[in-house]
Structure formats: C-alpha cells, structure tokens
Image (cartoon, grey):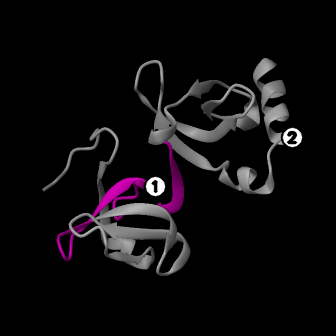
Amino acid sequence: MVVEAKTEILEAKMTKQESRAMRKSRGKRVDNGERVCGWYVFDRLQGSHYIFDDMAKGAWKFEVIPETVGQFTGKLDKNGKEIYNKTILLDALYKIGYLVCYGESQFGYGWFLQSTKDKTRTYRFDKSISRMEVIDDIHDGELKSKE
C-alpha cells in the first residue's frame, strides 16, 4: 500500500528525537478544520505535517495544521477524557485554569502546567490533574468553557 511505503521512508529518515515525537496526537485538518486523532508525522520531503489514524494498519493520513498539533500526555482528566498538549484544564477545587505545556520550565524539561491568569507561574504536571477537567483548547475553542 502507498501509505505504508511512505511511512517506512519517513521512519527510516527520522532521528531518535523525531521518532520520540511520533506519539498519539491530535490536530486540525488542513482541508476542513476538523479535529483528528492518531499518530503525528512530519514529512521532511514534502514539508507537510500528517496524522495517521492507524499507522499499524497503514490506514488513512490527514494533513494537519502544525500549530494545532498537540501530543497526548498519557493522562486522563477526572472524567476520563484524554489530556493533550495545548489543552486548558480547570482545577475544580481552586477554580483555576491551567494550560498544559511541554518544554523547559523551572522543573526541568517535560510536561508542566501554566496558569491561564498569570503566565509567569508554572506548576508540576502531576497527580493533582486527577481532580482537573478539560474545558477548552487554545486553538479553536471547540470545547466549551465552563467559566
């Protein structure tokens, strides 16, 4: 299948850092703006960003807007909803919003939370997220805020 062959070429040319980035992700499609979820790949040959809905089976690929791609953190909110990078969480106990981020912070390199009110304040991305709820996404407001 063409998709499988193309995927093999992409994987062969990827560095270790790039292959680590190939995790479950979501992003908005270029053609219609719909949110898709799957495995993110950057095609350096074409300069395009794709999400494959099931790379193991060589299924469909969708070109996505790179700025909207967010990687799955591996964690779920209090309602069992997946938490992705660039998602806004609400801490129900303290009524505070946090943006989920990945990068360098005062805690080192990795996942952290950034206050939506004071962007200079960052917090550890830890078990306290179990009391938090996904309320919004920074790219399209597709999730309804509960403020």
Q: Earlier in the sequence, mark 1 or mark 2?
A: 2
Residue 103 position within the rendered picture, expressed as x and y whole percent measured from the top left: 53, 65
Q: Which of the 4 quarters of the picture holds residue 47?
A: top right
Query: Which secondary structure lies at badge 1?
Result: loop
Say which mark, if any, is on residue 12: 2
Range of the magenta residues?
69-97
Say which mark, if any, is on residue 24: none
Query: Is 89 colored magenta in this rendering?
Result: yes
Residue 101 position within the rendered picture, expressed as x and y whole percent measured from the top left: 44, 62
Q: What residue is shown at x 20% (from left), y 66% (from top)? A: 117
Indicate left or right for 96 with 65 as reference.
Answer: left
Indicate left or right for 125 with 21 as reference.
Answer: left
Mark 1 residue type: Asn
In this view, the residue in front, 76 or 64, is 64
Determine whether 106 is above or below 135 in the image: below
Residue 122 position within the rendered picture, expressed as x and y whole percent measured from the top left: 36, 75
Query: Is 106 colored magenta in this rendering?
Result: no
Indicate left or right for 134 with 8 as reference.
Answer: left
Determine whether 129 is above or below 87 in the image: below
Marks 1,2: beta carbons within 8 A: no
Determine whether 23 is above or below 77 in the image: above
Q: What residue is shown at x 78% (from left), y 32% (from top)? A: 7
Mark 2 residue type: Ala
Question: Disc 1 designates what residue?
Answer: 85
Q: What residue is shown at x 71% (from left), y 35% (from top)? A: 55
In this view, the residue in front, 19 or 55, is 19
